[in-house]
Amino acid sequence: MFTVTFVVNEKPGTDRGQALAYWRDTHGPIVRKVPGVRRYVQQHALGAPEGGPPFLGVASMYFDDQEAFATAAASAEFAAAVADVANFADPQLATAFTEDVVIVG
């Protein structure tokens, strides 16, 4: 499995609750249309040890392999998903190819 993970930061002036709802209810279905996505997970940040969370959340898209990701990244559906980020979050996404390392579970 090939995974791409995004750190999603808050968009200044946007209500956090509304941003999280939009991300889940509107952006999620847009991502669902991206070809080759095997799994899409949003992790909404609800708090932090020092109080408020430092970001809106983290999202991971899972593909069969890097080639499947490259095909998806070149699609109109992926472009639509990227363009939609500006509707609820800072469009500058910290992005990395990641690997799940399961320690428990």
Image (spheres, rainbow, N blue to C red):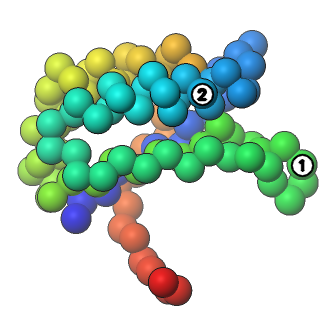
Q: Would you identify the image quadrant in which residue 50 lies?
A: bottom right
Residue 12 appears in view: no
Q: Is residue 99 above or below residue 44?
A: below
Seen from the viewer's position, the closer of residues 87 and 90 is 87
Seen from the viewer's position, the closer of residues 18 and 9 is 18
Q: Is residue 56 above or below residue 45?
A: above
Q: Is residue 52 left or right of residue 102?
A: right
User: x, y percentage for residue 80?
Assistant: 29, 18
Tell me which label, 2 or 1, sits earlier in the chain. Answer: 2
Secondary structure category for the residue under label 1: loop
From the image, tell me which residue sits under label 1.
51
User: x, y percentage for residue 36?
Assistant: 15, 44
Seen from the viewer's position, the closer of residues 77 and 93 is 77
Real-space Cα separation, disc 2 to disc 1, in angstroms: 21 Å
Task: Report crowding for label 2: few under 14, some 14 to 19, many 20 or more residues within 10 A (C-alpha).
Answer: some
User: x, y percentage for residue 57?
Assistant: 60, 43
Q: Is residue 12 left or right of residue 19?
A: right
Q: Are marks 2 and 1 in contact (CB under 8 Å)?
A: no
Q: Would you identify the image quadrant in which residue 54 lies?
A: top right
Q: Nearer the viewer, mark 2 or mark 1?
A: 2
Q: Residue furthest front?
A: 25
Q: Is residue 74 left or right of residue 48?
A: left
Q: Residue at x 15, y 58 (%)?
A: 64
From the image, tell me which residue sits under label 2.
21
